[in-house]
Image (tube, rainbow, N blue to C red):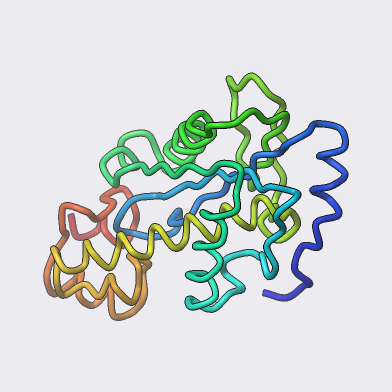
Amino acid sequence: MSGAPPDGSLDRELAARHGLIAGVDEVGRGAIAGPVTVAAVILDPARPIAGLDDSKRLRPSVRERLAIEIRAKAVAFAVAHRSPAEIDRVNILEATRAAMVDAVLALDADFGLVVSDAVFLPGLDVPVLAEPRADARYLCVAAASILAKVVRDRAMAALGCEHPGYGWASNKGYPTPAHLDALRRLGVSALHRTTYAPVRVLA
């Protein structure tokens, strides 16, 4: 993925009209195992964090360092998950949307706008800007993407210890060749998403 990291100008433009902004993003929509994880973050304009970018552009060690700084400096942050069972029950978009709303509502601060990475969030008391690739354009959404990625990666590594053989510590539940081979050899676990095609054919 190419392009310059967000410089904060778009965040500042929105903040001038709305005050504090909550950025929200998800990780794990394309995985075939494990939860979808969402983070919502309100950054503090007085405590800038250098190096924020779409989490997919950053090395794991950089994401880990930035996640610590986000937790320390943000005005507020919250994380929410939806399980594979719920993803199968309502579909990944609706599960993601519900987790995003939960994360935003869990923020312990006042804010005037939510910026979402492409997913519209109905029923909130503040306006929502749902913009594709917002994690590469807005610092607050980049921060949310980093925090969600770090939390979910850690969770998948722990779940991999409970369900050995699938390689979740390395593939994080995504359909890599090694994961698909393990799925064929070991069968479908309780944490696989049975409505996803690679799993559905074996379930």
Among the 4 quarters of the image, the one containing residue 145: bottom right
**Residue 2 position in % (x across, y down):** 73, 75
Residue at the spot x=78%, y=33% of the render?
A: 19
Looking at the image, is 91 positioned above or below residue 123?
Answer: below
Nearest the camera: 19 or 40?
A: 19
Residue 58 position in % (x across, y down)? 58, 74
Q: Nearer the viewer, residue 168 or 202?
A: 168
Compared to 144, does 14 lie above or below?
Answer: above
Q: Is residue 80 depicted above or below 64 in this figure?
A: above
Q: How many marks?
A: 0
* x and y percentages locating residue 68 in the rendered image: 49, 62
| Depth check, front residue: 190 or 72 | 72
Quadrant in the picture for the N terminus = bottom right
Q: Quadrant of residue 168?
A: bottom left
Name the image quarter holding the C terminus: bottom left
Q: Is residue 171 left or right of residue 4?
A: left
Residue visible at 83% across and 50% down? 10
Q: What residue is shown at x 66% (from left), y 48% (from top)?
A: 43
Q: Residue at x 44, y 37 (%)?
A: 99
Expressed as whole percent of the image width and height from the top left, the position of residue 187 reads: 13, 65
